[in-house]
Amino acid sequence: TEEARRAGDAVTEARACSMSAVNAAAAGLPWDEGGVRAALDMFADVGDHKGRLRLSNALGMCSYFEGKWDAAVRHYAVAEQAARQIGRDFDAAGGAANRAEVLVQQGKVDEVVTAITEAIRALAALDARSLLSFAVTIAGRVALARGDYEEATTKLGEARALCVEMGEREDMIFV
């Protein structure tokens, strides 16, 4: 981050700030929220919309790791909207799936159904199997929370099959 700052490279500085914050938050360490917000402004100043959506997603992850779930939902929603505005369906579906995961954990399953259904549809159309397996897992968790065990078993089985097909054995244990 410092090297990019000295070089006057705002985009690289913003990306480095984002990665540093996510890594720190994932490790349970303090992260520089002010720096990340400044990085959002940097992306806005240079018109880097993709950078802004990714950084909003990073803010969602940092908030999630910190246990600030309402903030995580807001950041993921911002990332999702930003992705839609620039035609990045994959990123929008990813933001929706991330937001849905947090909402399910909060017990707000009724707020999840439309978002996760649309995300699954987009990811299937894009043949984005890795993220699709995550989204289908969330749909299975929604069914489980609603007490629909047959649908939960079906969705979690679909997610597991996608993981096996891709050779993502680590993800299989969660499905």
Image (tube, rainbow, N blue to C red):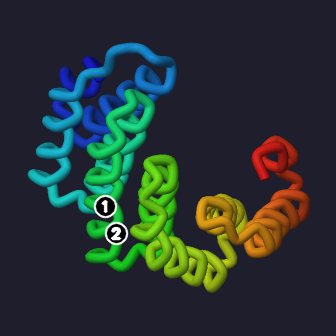
In front of the other: label 1 or label 2? Answer: 1
Q: Which residue is mark 1?
A: 77
- Coordinates of residue 54 in the picture (x, y in percent): 36, 52
- Density class for disc 1 (Cα within 10 Å; few <14, some 14-19, many ≥20) is many
Tell me where residue 36 sits by quadrant: top left
Q: Which is nearer the eye, 149 or 157?
A: 149
- Coordinates of residue 9 in the picture (x, y in percent): 22, 36
SS class of the residue under badge 1?
helix
- Asked whether disc 1 touches disc 2, contact meaning CB atoms under 8 Å apart, the reply is no
Tell me where residue 8 sits by quadrant: top left
Q: Amino acid at mark 1?
A: Ala
Q: Amino acid at mark 2?
A: Ala
Q: Which image quarter holds the N terminus?
A: top left
Location of residue 67 with respect to 147 vertically, above or below: above
In the image: residue 78, left or right of residue 22: left
In the image: residue 90, left or right of residue 20: right
In the image: residue 122, left or right of residue 13: right
- Coordinates of residue 69 in the picture (x, y in percent): 36, 42
Q: Which residue is mark 2?
A: 83
SS class of the residue under badge 2?
helix
Q: Which is nearer the eye, 20 or 162?
A: 162
Name, please, the residue furthest toward the front: 147
Residue occupying the point 50% across, 19% down: 27
- Coordinates of residue 140 in the picture (x, y in percent): 68, 65
Name, please, the residue furthest toward the top: 29
Residue occupying the point 71% across, 63% down: 133
In the image: residue 130, left or right of residue 73: right
Location of residue 78 with respect to 115 vertically, above or below: above
Residue occupying the point 47% across, 53% down: 107
Residue occupying the point 51% across, 62% down: 97
